[in-house]
Image (tube, rainbow, N blue to C red):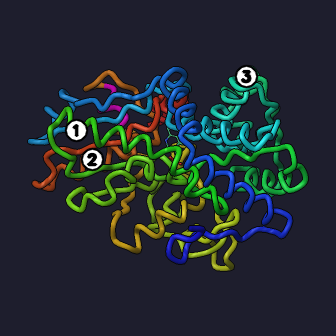
């Protein structure tokens, strides 16, 4: 269970092995317990606003040739993205384990906000570790976290961004595991996080599969999602894995182009290595040092990817493609114009890939995970459009 083929595992220092095995046991018990799921489902209904719609984008589809585009509207969730599905699950697990404090890493601040939100909801103390560079770039989310009662801890080591924040959170956790639960933000990190987070995000695909059968009368020919660490993607893919006719496409950020070196395409352009306690595909330099990832969308610039994605790529079940900043920005504008929906820049990568997939005749129904809304990206987009 702790490996996906050769990927995954639990490559951590000795002090964290026992806590992680305890967490795994607690997660396994909880996930087999109906009362756990009913509490989780009730919060998703009443607090998050699920089920999110699976919306037929009629005008956008009309602008393309002979294809129906369906949008899974994770942007309509409370806090504006899919991340809350996961933080609710982990916070409920923390309660079962009698932990009183939550800690989390964050890059762009989206996961930090989702963790601070559930901490306020359930009455936990909360600390969020964030690189100093990211604190500078993502002030609105820093202010949100503080307003929600979380303490934001600046991390100055390394490049002072997400990978350093996650290293620091793991280090800090090993000193305080007795009363503290570490809420990881994506399907990365040591066992059990990759499969545990997937279990909390698979609601996206479970709902979508029923909604497609109900609304479209068929399963989609193709399902597309953006891949940062890979949690919204695995979340929507999971219920379709055994539907062989459904093609699954994960989209990595090509940033300024794969040749430029400024991108976040860990599967497409990375190598096997170990980061944050797991073996997966990583961006590395010639010495095996982790390279800084770059993307126009802060949520995609993680230098690794969840181990299950590396496995699904090798198994040939999921195809991984890349989309540049420029292509994502163009897709962002199209969705605003045709549907009155401002998507997150992350989700815009999935949209841009859909515009390429329509060229394949077989694709009559394409389902896209609209992982989040773009309000957070407005300033950034305005600045870029002005400079063009
Ligand atoms: C964080 C984020 C992502 C990327 O994270 P995954 O774990 O790959 O899903 C994608 N979209 C949005 C809106 C995000 O906030």
Q: Earlier in the sequence, mark 1 or mark 3?
A: 1
**Magenta residues?**
331-336
Does residue 306 appear left or right of residue 159 in this picture?
left
Name the residue rendered at 65%, 59% in the picture.
Answer: 189
- Residue 361 percent coordinates (x, y): 10, 54
Distance, label 1 to label 2, CA atoms, is 8 Å
Whether label 1 touches label 2, CB < 8 Å: yes
Does residue 261 appear left or right of residue 347 in this picture?
right
In the displayed structure, 321 sits above or below 336; it is below
For the residue pair 153 and 295, the one nearer the viewer reads as 153
Distance, label 1 to label 3, CA atoms, is 36 Å
Q: Earlier in the sequence, mark 2 or mark 3?
A: 3
Q: Earlier in the sequence, mark 1 or mark 2?
A: 1
Name the residue rendered at 37%, 44% in the picture.
Answer: 205
For the residue pair 216 and 264, the one nearer the viewer reads as 216
Instruction: Check disc 3: other Cα within 10 Å, few if <14, some if 14-19, many if 20+.
Output: some
- Which residue ends up furthest to the right in the rendered image? 175
Give the overall secondary structure of the magenta segment.
helix
Q: Which numbered circle lies on residue 354?
A: 2
Which secondary structure, mark 3? loop
Distance, label 2 to label 3, CA atoms, is 36 Å
Name the residue rendered at 55%, 49% in the picture.
Answer: 32
Does residue 341 appear left or right of residue 265 in this picture?
left
- Residue 29 percent coordinates (x, y): 63, 51
Whether label 2 touches label 3, CB < 8 Å: no
């Amino acid at each position: 269970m702790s490996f996906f083929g050769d990927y995954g595992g639990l490559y951590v220092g000795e002090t964290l092995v026992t806590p992680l095995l305890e967490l795994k046991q607690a997660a396994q018990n909880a996930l087999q317990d109906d009362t756990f799921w009913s509490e989780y489902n009730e919060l998703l209904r009443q607090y998050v606003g699920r089920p999110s719609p699976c919306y037929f984008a009629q005008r956008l589809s009309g602008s393309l040739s002979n294809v129906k585009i369906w949008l899974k509207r994770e942007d309509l969730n409370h806090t504006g993205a899919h991340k809350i599905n996961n933080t609710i699950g982990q916070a409920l697990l923390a309660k079962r384990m009698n932990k009183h404090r939550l800690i989390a890493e964050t890059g762009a601040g989206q996961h930090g906000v989702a963790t601070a939100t559930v901490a306020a909801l359930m009455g936990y103390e909360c600390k969020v570790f964030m690189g100093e560079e990211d604190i500078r770039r993502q002030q609105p989310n820093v202010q949100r976290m503080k307003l929600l009662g979380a303490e934001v801890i600046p991390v100055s080591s390394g490049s002072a961004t997400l990978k350093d924040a996650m290293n620091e959170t793991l280090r800090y956790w090993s000193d305080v595991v007795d009363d503290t639960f570490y809420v990881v933000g994506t399907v990365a990190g040591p066992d059990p996080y990759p499969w545990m987070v997937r279990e909390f995000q698979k609601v996206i695909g479970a709902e979508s599969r029923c909604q497609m059968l109900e609304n479209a009368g068929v399963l989609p020919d193709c399902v597309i999602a953006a891949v940062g660490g890979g949690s919204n993607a695995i979340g929507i893919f999971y219920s379709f894995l055994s539907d062989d006719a459904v093609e699954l496409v994960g989209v990595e950020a090509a940033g300024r182009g794969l040749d430029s070196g400024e991108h976040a395409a860990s599967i497409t352009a990375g190598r096997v290595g170990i980061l944050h306690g797991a073996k997966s595909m990583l961006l590395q330099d010639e010495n095996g040092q982790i390279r800084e990832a770059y993307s126009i969308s802060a949520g995609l610039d993680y230098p690794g990817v969840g181990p299950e994605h590396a496995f699904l790529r090798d198994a040939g079940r999921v195809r991984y493609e890349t989309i540049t900043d420029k292509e994502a920005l163009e897709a962002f504008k199209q969705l605003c114009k045709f549907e009155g929906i401002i998507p997150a820049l992350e989700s815009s990568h999935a949209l841009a890939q859909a515009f390429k997939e329509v060229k394949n005749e077989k694709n009559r129904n394409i389902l896209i995970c609209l992982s989040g809304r773009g309000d957070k990206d407005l300033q950034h987009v305005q600045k870029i459009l002005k400079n063009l």
